[in-house]
Image (cartoon, rainbow, N blue to C red):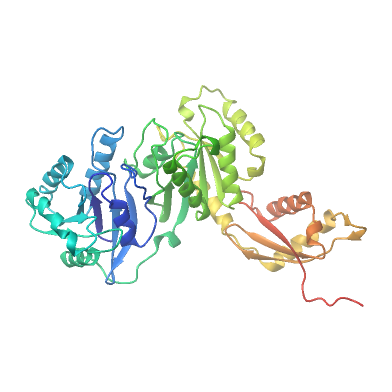
């Protein structure tokens, strides 16, 4: 395990900006608005060939609907950390919350670094004078936005920890199955991840829009690793007006661009909505493996036929995802939550499957013999050969004489036949038709 460095402080002091600066990413959502971050946000960092895990936390405050939840998250981050950075605001000065956090950190038997942000240069370091009232011996002036003073802070953090290991920085994202948990607001995405992790990692509330950023959580079971990405609820475009929510939805959609499998969470108690199907469509368009999760099943009045009726309705509304497994679950009670990963493994294995060129062309020959494509302007459409050009999802290129003339229904026929012959029944498959090149035209 790499050492953990946690950044704590009150809202809007620049914790997420410092997180992005040190991790050299834009993973943490940064908006000039207090209280954007609510959950713990983890990232890999490296300084002078030394690697560690950096944790961004929500702002330590009161009077917010989520104040108690955020305080719990901050206390948990402090408990888990090896080193703590308390970030203070050099422009706003000292607040009662700063004094409260300092009092808490004085009881912690771990290295604590007190940094004053928004100090853009040496001439502004006079602003540090006020903060010595807190009884602190060493203050680190810095500007997370402009990088001023960050080097000195990191040098001293590394120096305190002899256990900080050196070596190549591992990228766990490349070694794990990446799962994006997506859905409408308040369908239970964060509750599901908390249930899987067995801890209160993410802030949960009945208030829609609680999750604002895409939050990564690494989880291991049966010697396999999964990266669970909690995302903001995706509402219909017409209902999104606030800038912050737009940013949150953009990050949620981006999580689909780089995930292996999308866990599309729906509220079974409310029933499947058009927006649920739209979100499933976003995942399908991006070529994700998909699993449809009907959550809050414990709230549904049911008999022996209820589940079958729900599945039939879902299949009717989302015909384009007829290959995607569907499950009824309850994040609250844990009903079938562990079984999700049996489906994830099956979907991922198919998602990353490669078919040999020989097998593909034998399949193509049999499929065409069974059902020939229609004529194009009186001429027969000829399929010369096929090859798989990539996985995630399996993508097949077929070289034909008239690629633009292959009807979508024939493309669907080929995909369905391939599913039957290769047992790729739970993953998306892409077919691309191209003109065969290198043939000389007859005069």
Q: Specify the quadrant that holds the N terminus.
A: bottom left
Please name the residue shown 23% across and 39% down the image.
61
Direction from residue 217 to residue 329 in the image, left or right: right
Toward the viewer: 225 or 250? 250
Q: Tell me residue 30's x, y (percent).
A: 36, 50
Q: Tell me residue 177's x, y (percent).
A: 47, 55
Counting labels gives 0
Direction from residue 99 to residue 118 in the image, left or right: right
Q: Tell me residue 158's x, y (percent).
A: 20, 66
Please name the residue shown 61% across and 30% down the image.
308
Q: Tell me residue 130's x, y (percent).
A: 11, 50
Q: Is residue 339 above or below residue 397?
A: above
Q: Is residue 200 above or below residue 128?
A: above
Direction from residue 410 to residue 244 in the image, left or right: left
Toward the viewer: 68 or 64? 64
Within the image, what quadrant is residue 173 found in?
bottom left
Toward the viewer: 197 or 287? 287
Q: Is residue 323 above or below residue 430?
A: above
Q: Is residue 405 visible?
A: yes
Toward the viewer: 111 or 9? 9
Please name the residue shown 17% across and 47% down the image.
93
Within the image, what quadrant is residue 208 found in?
top left
Q: Is residue 325 visible?
A: no
Please name the residue shown 47% across and 50% down the image.
179
Q: Specify the quadrant that holds the C terminus.
A: bottom right
């Amino acid at each position: 395990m790499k050492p953990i460095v946690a950044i704590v402080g009150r809202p809007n002091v620049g914790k997420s900006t410092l997180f992005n600066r040190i991790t050299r990413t834009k993973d943490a959502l940064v908006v000039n608005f207090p209280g954007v971050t609510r959950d713990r946000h983890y990232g890999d960092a490296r300084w002078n060939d030394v690697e560690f895990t950096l944790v961004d936390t929500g702002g330590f405050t009161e009077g917010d609907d989520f104040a108690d939840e955020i305080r719990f998250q901050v206390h948990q981050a402090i408990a888990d950390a090896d080193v703590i950075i308390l970030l203070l605001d050099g422009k706003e000065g000292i607040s009662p919350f700063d004094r409260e956090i300092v009092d808490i950190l004085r009881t912690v038997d771990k290295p604590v670094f007190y940094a004053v942000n928004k100090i853009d240069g040496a001439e502004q370091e006079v602003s540090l004078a006020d903060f010595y009232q807190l009884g602190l011996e060493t203050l680190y002036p810095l500007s997370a936005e402009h990088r001023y003073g960050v080097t000195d802070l990191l040098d001293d953090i590394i120096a305190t920890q002899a256990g900080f290991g050196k070596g190549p920085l591992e990228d766990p994202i490349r070694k794990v199955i990446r799962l994006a948990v997506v859905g409408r607001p308040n369908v239970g995405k964060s509750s599901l991840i908390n249930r899987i992790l067995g801890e209160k990692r993410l802030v949960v509330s009945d208030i829609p829009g609680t999750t604002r950023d895409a939050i990564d959580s690494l989880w291991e079971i049966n010697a396999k690793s999964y990266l669970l990405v909690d995302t903001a609820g995706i509402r219909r475009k017409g209902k999104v007006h606030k800038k912050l929510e737009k940013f949150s939805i953009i990050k949620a959609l981006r999580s689909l661009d780089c995930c292996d499998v999308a866990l599309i969470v729906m509220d079974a108690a409310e029933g499947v909505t058009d927006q649920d199907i739209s979100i499933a469509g976003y995942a399908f368009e991006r070529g994700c493996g998909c699993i449809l999760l009907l959550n809050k099943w414990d709230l549904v009045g049911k008999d022996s036929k209820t589940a079958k009726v729900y599945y039939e309705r879902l299949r009717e509304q989302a015909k384009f995802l007829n290959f995607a497994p569907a499950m009824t679950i309850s994040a609250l009670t844990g009903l079938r939550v562990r079984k999700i990963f049996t489906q994830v493994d099956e979907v991922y294995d198919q998602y990353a499957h490669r078919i040999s060129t020989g097998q593909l062309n034998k399949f193509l020959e049999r499929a065409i013999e069974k059902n020939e494509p229609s004529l194009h302007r009186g001429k027969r459409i000829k399929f010369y050969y096929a090859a798989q050009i990539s996985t995630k999802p399996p993508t097949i290129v077929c070289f034909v004489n008239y690629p633009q003339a292959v009807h979508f229904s024939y493309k669907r026929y080929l995909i369905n036949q391939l599913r039957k012959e290769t047992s790729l029944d739970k993953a998306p498959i892409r077919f691309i038709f191209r003109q065969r090149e290198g043939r000389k035209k007859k005069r």
